[in-house]
Image (spheres, rainbow, N blue to C red):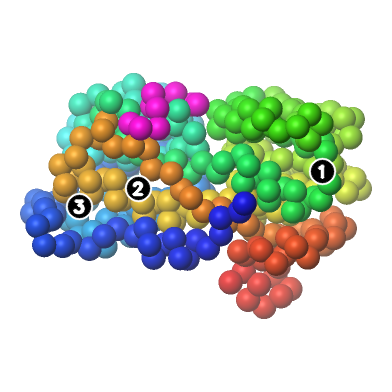
């Protein structure tokens, strides 16, 4: 079943206002570090939600931002700068950022965000808590939810191809593993999942060709920055083949995939801010906090991309879509 209604969730799950008996925010402004491994739109949207949540929580703070630009040497320098700044807490934005922060920052609370599966990727030992100086939230969408959306988009789908990259496939590997585990619980022949790995951006064409040779009914663009930032290369490789592009990456559906089962990253950031307030204001130990999990799935449909590809979308999909993208229809994105 698809859990919709992110606006309702936003009201229910926003940072709580101070109540009688609750600890007031520290009088001294808190110095908060922010580490970005790469330039991801998901991380940017999440950080915007964090900022809004902290503001609503009444926390006085300043940010110390550090960006690695996917460079390990820059990452080392960034963590050195965060340690020198004597931050009260550090936000690690994304899976790779969280993995690096886990190794580099041992004596300061670290709150990770935009980490799809922190357990499968090795960020924490379990969903009930890290037992260390880490806590955070997952933007993970359960595979059954993803499959529900994909089935709405492509009724009768039997062969699904996943296009991954060799260089930035940490999250997509976890998506693939959990989807395969879910499919193993279903009757035999329910759906067959095929994988293709692109060595680099020029290698996308070869990977797409290998999926086409396996007669896939649709191609999955996962949360893999090399792939979702290059949907145009995937479309070019498809040529005149009417194979729908489905995605779990918000940037993927806006970049040209026709249907996305995606996360409301602004709301995710708001929830991450609540965890930071738990540590800084309410004195909770980071390692004792369970990993926060999103419960909603946004269904976004790119009507313009579907029309360009000559693909007709089912009315049942359009009826449940949270957002329709089409510049030719006024207010379609609302």
Tell me how far mark 2 sits from mark 3, CA to CA. 15 Å
- Helix or strand or loop: what does disc 2 sit on? helix
Taking depth in this image into account, of 78 and 149 the one nearest to the observer is 149
Label 1 or label 2, whichever lies nearer to me, is 1
Tell me how far mark 1 sits from mark 2, CA to CA. 36 Å
Residue lying furthest bottom: 330
Taking depth in this image into account, of 77 and 286 the one nearest to the observer is 286
Per the image, the residue denoted by label 1 is 157
Q: How crowded is mark 2: few (under 14 residues within 10 Å), some or many (20 or more)?
A: many
Q: Residues within 10 Å of mark 1 (few under 14, many from 20)?
A: some
Tell me how far mark 1 sits from mark 3, CA to CA. 50 Å
259 vs 94: above or below:
below
Q: x, y percentage for residue 92? A: 36, 37
Q: Earlier in the sequence, mark 2 or mark 3?
A: 3
Q: x, y percentage for residue 73? A: 41, 24
Quarter occupied by residue 81 = top left
Circles 1, 2 touching at the beta carbon (< 8 Å): no
Q: Which residue is drawn at 31% across and 23% down?
A: 104
- Helix or strand or loop: what does disc 1 sit on? loop
Q: Earlier in the sequence, mark 1 or mark 3?
A: 3
Picture disc at residue 272: 2
Q: In which quarter of the image is the C terminus?
A: bottom right
Q: Residue at x 46, y 37 (%)?
A: 115
Q: Give the range drawn in magenta.
A: 120-129
Label 2 or label 3, whichever lies nearer to me, is 2
Q: Residue at x 13, y 55 (%)?
A: 22
Asked whether residue 189 appears in the rendered view, the answer is yes
Per the image, the residue denoted by label 3 is 61
Is 260 on the left or on the right of 287, as rendered? right
Asked whether residue 250 appears in the rendered view, the answer is no
Q: x, y percentage for residue 122? A: 44, 23
């Amino acid at each position: 079943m698809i859990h919709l209604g992110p606006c309702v969730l936003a009201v229910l799950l926003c940072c709580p206002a101070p109540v009688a008996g609750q600890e007031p925010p520290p009088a001294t402004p808190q110095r908060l570090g922010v580490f970005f491994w790469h330039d991801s739109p998901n991380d940017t949207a999440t950080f915007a939600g964090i900022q809004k949540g902290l503001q609503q929580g009444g926390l006085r703070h300043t940010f110390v931002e550090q960006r690695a630009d996917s460079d390990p040497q820059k990452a080392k320098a960034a963590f050195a700068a965060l340690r020198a700044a004597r931050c009260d807490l550090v936000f690690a934005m994304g899976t790779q950022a969280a993995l690096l922060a886990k190794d580099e920052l041992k004596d300061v609370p670290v709150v990770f965000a935009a980490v799809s599966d922190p357990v499968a990727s090795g960020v924490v030992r379990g969903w009930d808590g890290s037992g260390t100086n880490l806590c955070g939230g997952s933007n993970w969408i359960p595979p059954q939810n993803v499959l529900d959306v994909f089935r709405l988009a492509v009724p009768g789908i039997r062969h699904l191809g996943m296009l991954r990259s060799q260089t930035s496939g940490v999250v997509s590997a976890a998506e693939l593993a959990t989807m395969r585990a879910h499919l193993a619980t279903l009757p035999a022949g329910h759906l067959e999942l095929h994988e293709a790995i692109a060595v680099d951006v020029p290698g996308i064409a070869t990977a797409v060709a290998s999926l086409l040779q396996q007669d896939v009914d649709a191609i999955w663009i996962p949360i893999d920055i090399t792939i979702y930032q290059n949907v145009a290369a995937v479309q070019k490789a498809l040529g005149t083949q009417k194979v729908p592009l489905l995605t779990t990456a918000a940037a993927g559906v806006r970049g040209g995939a026709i249907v996305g089962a995606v996360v409301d990253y602004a709301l995710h950031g708001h929830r991450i801010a609540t965890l930071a307030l738990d540590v800084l204001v309410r004195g909770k130990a980071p390692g004792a906090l369970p990993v926060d999990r999103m419960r909603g799935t946004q269904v976004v449909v790119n009507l313009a991309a579907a029309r360009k590809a000559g693909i007709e979308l089912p009315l049942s999909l359009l009826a449940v879509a949270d957002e329709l993208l089409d510049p030719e229809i006024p207010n379609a994105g609302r």
